[in-house]
Image: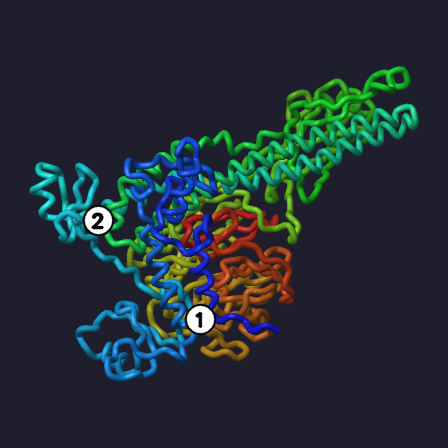
Amino acid sequence: MAERPSAAQEALSKVEDQLSCLVCLEPYTNPRLLSCFHVYCQHCLEDIVAHNRQGQLECPKCRRPTPLPPTGVSGLQAAFNVHHLFDIQETLKKVKEPQKLACEKCVKTTRKATSFCRQCTKFICEKCTDMHKEWEEFEGHEVVTIKKIEGDLIRLVSPKKTSPRCPKHDDNMRLYCETCGELICRDCIVHIHKDHKYCVIADTFESHKKEILDSLGPVEKQLEATDTALVNLDGRHAEIVEHGGKVATNIHSKFDELHQALYAREGELMAELESHTQQQLKSLSAQREEVEILQTQRSSCLHFVRESIRTGSPGDVLKMKQGVVKQVRELVDTFYPNTLEPRETTNTCFVPSAQLVKDCKKYGALCCVNIPQKAIADQKVTAYCRFLSAKNSTPPELWAVKAWVRHLRREAKLISKIIDKATKCVVKERGKGEYEISYQPTVGGASELIVRVGGEEVAGSPFPVAVKTPIDKLGTVIKTINDPKSPYGVALNLAGEIIVAEQVAGIVSIFSPTGDKLRTLDTRGTAVGEMKNPRGVSVDGDDNILVVDAGNSRLLKFSRGGDLIPAVGSHDDGAGQFNNPIGVCVNSVNGKVYVVEYGADCVHIFNSDLTFSSQFGSKGSGNGQFSLPWDVASDRSGCVYVVDYYNCRVQVFTPDGGYLKQFGKRGSGNGELTYPVSICVDSDDLVYVGELGNDRVSVFTCEGVFLKSFGSKGSGPGQFDCPFGIAVDQCGVVYVSDYRNNRVQILS
């Protein structure tokens, strides 16, 4: 078996991949930036211009043209951030063989290097390391031992942010001419830029940097739109293929009835269908390529500008500002949202001819009709409803009801209470005055079935319908609430309202099931009833809201309307006192309140009136011990589940705190956990665990059997960055507080 490459070798390979020009496949030489934010060697770009009949410069990757400055390719913006990658490459080559590293600070000796100073960018020995700790000259230097350089190796080398020198006066250019958008030195003010508006770079760099970063806002939105469009295009591709198969099945069934007389025509229509479907797929494929180009342009833009600002000196950044902002605006202006909508639809159907035998040679035709797209759901729910005459609520005979309904319009629709989207229903007569209503929900969650006869709703309408997504299909985002700032704990009350603790803001916000903010518990402060750092939230059987306030080391209970009931606890180590409380849950069996305290590695148990009952747990890795417990939940039998952060596991206890079992171990595979921080148990006793290390949610049975995981690190739909809170409603819809992305994602 081949030996696994070291972290240094992997990092080196990753860096070297970024240093290869896509044209010559060699390391960059004098890299230049195009308007699409792709980078190539200067000589490669000059060859492209030379071989273009019109002398134009077109990106080899995305084909976007770049206007050439008067000085030609040499006048294009230099990709100075690439030079930083070469510095990283050289350092990583040394780290790859640490046993051969000698101290680069010592002059008269060849002592073995044991550490690396990021500020000096040199490998140093133990003696030089001690000097770094003791000498005032090295105060603030970051020294990392070679043994511990196994994390973010690519960020090991600090960027060399040197100020550029004026080519005319050989002096550092510390000023920025706002009139010309150029870097200048002091002599330039007198000779070239007299009476121009200028400023000191060090004084105004932050405002200029903010202006550059602000210009990226539309690009981020466009990148998100292209991501969604690509998903939609792939979905439409599958729909067209599947729909083409359905039409083909219909054609087969009709032609089987005609046997040999229609056999020849069947082949013609199948060929026509295949041709039409392939044309649609070809058109869809071409559109997908267009959207991918838009996506890669914007991805390159965001990556280049951010990396340039991170790695470049203020002078370098301001030197490129004017050109980059112009390029960004041009990129934004060339974005047309109508190109993101799929151009092809599944509008092909088979229309049988009226005359069968006589017209068998021309039987049937393929045509396109504007039929609304039907979403394919994972489950089909059927409900039954009896329609009764408004005039005869208790008719003497069923046939009279049936006759009365037959002459009136019968219609039904299913509406999701989360996204307010209607699903078309089919009403079918079953006989004896009963009608079957069938529908295919597009999303899971609480819904309402509206039934009308003759334009009037029948008695009992709307009917509540619970649409539950199978666990193996769980993970699709159906709505995102972007209002919360740094959301931590999340819970649901009896009305389906979403309760979110906003940690940094020091408030608790309540949202409607559709995501509209309804009210806020915003009593920020240190007095009793006020909050400073709310984290965990929960709801009891009376719809009261319980909040753990880590900043004030307090547990608070509010009525649904926001009135404070009691508040207990203070910063202390005694019974019922707290040292960094973080998670809370209400046990539906005994009504008791469980509060996780990671500062003391224990769980407090309070009675329903918040009087102290008992506590369990201690620091350690044994059964019933914790190493930073983070969150708590309970199941239908009253068992208590606690996520154990550093031990990377979930422990299960009796309602009184007696140890029962545990599951999970550190890792990123199925059933493994890395730094679990949130937990919830649904009405079916399925356990949902949010992982800080893997930025995902894993689902287990109450016995600890792994079922499903969804999510990954990122800011896109279905991705997470610190999933600190989880709640699950009666329909299995999952609510995840996405802390660093400042949002709550709703998934089914």
Residue depicted at x 31% and y 56%: 311
Residue annotated with mark 2: 205
Instruction: Decide if residue 523 is on the left or right side of residue 147.
Output: left
Counting from the top left corner in percent of width and height, residue 317 is at 27, 49
Q: Secondary structure at mark 1?
A: loop
Q: Quadrant of the N terminus?
A: bottom right
Residue depicted at x 67% and y 27%: 347
Q: For this rendering, which residue is in front, 269 or 58?
A: 58
Which amino acid type is shown beneath numbered disc 2?
Phe
Counting from the top left corner in percent of width and height, residue 494 is at 53, 48
Image position of 4 with respect to 299: above or below: below
Colouring:
rainbow
Residue 562 visible at all:
no
* The residue positioned farthest toward the right in the image shown: 260
The quarter holding residue 431 reads top right
Task: Give the distance between the C-alpha atoms of the residues marked 2 and 1, in whole angstroms.
Answer: 42 Å
